[in-house]
Image (cartoon, rainbow, N blue to C red):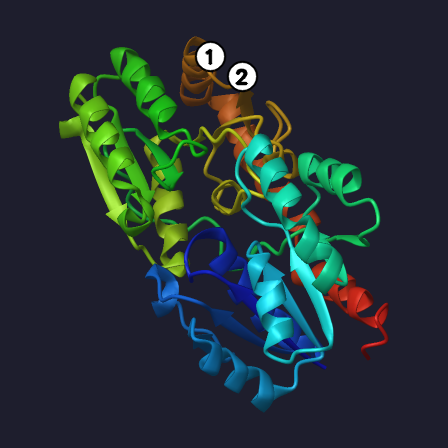
């Protein structure tokens, strides 16, 4: 069987997901290709599967005609469903819901997508994320749903011994957008620095995906909080290098702060936990798969900077709790998220459409 995955751009969690699942589904006999409509920062993350980058009808049709896919998984871009049908694709089309942002944004997008889902789509694929499942049940009760946990590379993402930074680091991974809630990260770090004057901030993001107004607001807030001299920004770091950084953050005595309003899955959180890097997070839905409070990570109520500071300081100062969270987090990821489970569930989904 042959499958095509599509997305807007090779960047962020979806690019990570595509790389992992293509490499591993192929081991179970499913040939996988990926189509991106635009180039992006993840273009250098090479895999052992074909990747096409084109937004032109002629280019997309050439890919479709040449490869005769049994199924196409269209991630997020519901408009592409109609386009693929118009270009002559008449086999199984599955819409995949990933990275739709805040619940209100996800609701609006799904409502807008209804005519396309009705006319062109065979099913929807979602991670085990409560708000997405609830929205599709409510808005698209007629659409068949497949719920499959995303792959996490627990083999590559593990602690890498090395010389840790001298000073503690609080890190953040994401895009400069309102749903990722970068402003709260800065506020929390500013308050923790009052207790930890030697604190450093590391931010991993793709500036090409940030709107100009967000960049301007970020620079203003950074300046007003007096954090500019404490911040290191890392751009376009290849995904396979991130275990080195997560391990360094863990060794520094710091942690990863995930301040998102809503996450469909939360790859940065999952991968950090795999590397035994402690995580303090908002309860952004998707990360519930990884975090049990004070067992595999820590939660704080979104918007409550004081609570975040208290939880963050405990994560840094209570060493027995910190070490237990690091160990239990890694054990949880290894036991729950692996390649075999995803391949089995994905094949069962295709088999249900008589694709064998």
Q: Position of residue 227 (x, y in %)?
A: 19, 24
Left or right placement of residue 53 versus residue 75 in this view: left
* Front in this rendered view, residue 49 or 251: 49
Q: Residue at position x 53%, y 35% from top?
A: 326
Left or right placement of residue 196 versus residue 62 in this view: left
What's the distance in space between the residues labelled 2 and 1, CA to CA?
A: 6 Å
The quarter of the displayed image where residue 313 is located: top left
SS at mark 2 in the image: loop
The quarter of the displayed image where residue 77 is located: bottom right
Dot 2 crowding, Cα within 10 Å, few <14, some 14–19, many 20+? some
Q: Is residue 291 above or below residue 110?
A: above
Quadrant showing the C terminus: bottom right
Dot 1 crowding, Cα within 10 Å, few <14, some 14–19, many 20+? few
Q: Which mark is residue 304?
A: 1
Q: Is residue 243 above or below residue 188?
A: below
Number of labels in the image equals: 2
CB under 8 Å between callouts 2 and 1?
Answer: yes
Left or right placement of residue 280 versus residue 137 in this view: left
Q: Residue at position x 26%, y 46% from top?
A: 234
Q: Residue at position x 63%, y 36% from top?
A: 107
Q: Is residue 50 above or below residue 288?
A: below
Quadrant showing the N terminus: bottom right
Left or right placement of residue 105 versus residue 9 in this view: right
Q: Position of residue 322 (x, y in %)?
A: 49, 26
- Circle 2 sits on which residue? 301
Q: Position of residue 349 (x, y in %)?
A: 79, 64
Q: Residue at position x 51%, y 66% from top?
A: 19
The answer, for residue 328, to whether it is visible in the render is no
């Amino acid at each position: 069987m042959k499958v095509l995955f599509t997305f807007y751009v090779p960047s962020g969690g979806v690019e990570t997901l595509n790389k992992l699942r293509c490499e591993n589904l192929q081991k179970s006999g499913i040939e996988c290709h990926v189509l991106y409509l635009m180039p992006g920062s993840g273009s250098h993350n090479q895999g052992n599967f074909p990747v096409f980058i084109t937004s032109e009808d002629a280019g997309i049709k050439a890919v479709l005609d040449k490869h005769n896919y049994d199924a196409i998984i269209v991630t997020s871009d519901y408009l592409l469903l109609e386009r693929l049908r118009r270009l002559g694709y008449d086999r199984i089309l599955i819409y995949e819901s990933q990275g739709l942002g805040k619940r209100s944004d996800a609701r609006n997008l799904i409502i807008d997508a209804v005519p396309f889902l009705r006319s062109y789509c065979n099913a929807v694929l979602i991670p085990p994320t409560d708000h997405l499942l609830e929205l599709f049940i409510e808005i698209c009760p007629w659409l068949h749903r497949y719920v499959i946990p995303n792959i996490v590379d627990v083999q590559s993402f593990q602690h890498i011994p090395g010389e840790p930074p001298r000073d503690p680091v609080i890190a953040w991974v994401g895009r400069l957008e309102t749903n990722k809630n970068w402003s709260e990260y800065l506020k929390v770090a500013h308050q923790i620095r009052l207790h930890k004057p030697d604190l450093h901030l590391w931010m991993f993001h793709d500036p090409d995906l940030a709107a100009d107004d967000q960049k301007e607001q970020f620079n203003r807030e950074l300046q007003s909080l007096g954090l500019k001299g404490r911040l290191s920004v890392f751009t376009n770091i290849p995904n396979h290098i991130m275990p080195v950084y997560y391990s360094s953050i863990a060794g520094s005595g710091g942690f990863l702060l995930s301040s998102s309003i809503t996450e469909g899955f939360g790859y940065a959180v999952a991968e950090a936990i795999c590397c035994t890097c402690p995580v303090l997070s908002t309860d952004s839905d998707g990360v519930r798969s990884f975090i049990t409070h004070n067992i595999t990570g820590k939660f704080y109520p979104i918007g409550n900077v004081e609570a975040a500071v208290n939880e963050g300081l405990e994560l840094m100062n209570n060493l027995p709790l910190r070490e237990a969270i690091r160990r239990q987090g890694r054990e949880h990821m290894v036991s729950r998220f692996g390649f075999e489970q995803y391949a089995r569930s994905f094949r069962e989904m295709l088999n249900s459409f008589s694709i064998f």
